[in-house]
Amino acid sequence: MSNVLKKAGLAAAVVVIYFFVIREVRQEVHNFYMGTVLPDEHGEINDHYSFYSQSSVSFTICSECTEYGKGWLFKVPFGSFWLFGAFALVLISAKRESYLILSAIHLSAGVVTFLFVLIGQNGFDILMIGTDFISRYLLPLFSLGYVALVIGQSKTKSTPDE
C-alpha cells in the first residue's frame, strides 16, 4: 500500500510542478522571444516572414499570413507531452535518471528550435520547416517513445532468463 501512496504523491508532485512552475517558465520563455528574437508586436518579422501567437506558449511563423493556421509552428517545449511522459514514468516507478533524460530531450528540442528560428528568419525556409517538424512530430514522438523504451527495458529486466 505504501508503494501506491508513494506513486500517488509523486504523481501529484509532478502535476503541481508542471502547473505552478513549468507552465510559468514556458510563458516567460515565450515572453523572452517577444522583443528579442521576434519583434515586440505580432506581425512582420522582416521582408520574408510574419508571425502570430496561437497561445501563450507557441508562435506560427509564415511567409504569407493570409490564412489562420497556415505556417510553421514553433512551440516552447515542456508541454503536455512532457507531463504525460513524466506521469507515465511515475506509474512505472522509473529511476530518477529517466526523468532527467526526458527533460533533456525537451531542453535539447528547445535549444535546437531556438537556433532554427534565429537562423531561419533570415530566409532559410528549411529551418522553419525543421522547427515545425520538431514541435509537431519529433518532440511528441521522442517524449512518448522514450517512455515506451523505458517500459520495455523494465519488462526485460524483470523477466527471468529461461
Image (spheres, rainbow, N blue to C red):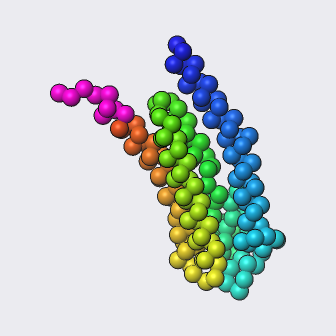
Q: Position of residue 151 (x, y in %)?
A: 40, 37
Q: Residue at x 75, y 55 (%)?
A: 28
Quarter occupied by the C terminus = top left
Query: Outermost residue toward the left?
Result: 162
Specify start and end residues of the magenta stretch as a single range: 154-162
Q: Quadrant of residue 29?
A: bottom right
Q: Is residue 81 above or below residue 120?
A: above
Q: Position of residue 110 (x, y in %)?
A: 59, 60
Q: Residue furthest front?
A: 97
* Quadrant of res 51: bottom right
Question: Which residue occupies the foreground of this view, 96 or 145?
Answer: 96
x and y percent of residue 77 in the render? Answer: 61, 55
Asked if residue 140 can be seen in this view, the reply is no
Identify which residue is drawn at 69% across, 35% down.
16
Identify the residue at image location x=61%, y=50%. Answer: 78
Q: Is residue 7 left or right of residue 141?
A: right
Where, by quadrant of the figure, is residue 13 drawn?
A: top right
Query: Quick check: is 156 in the magenta stretch?
Result: yes
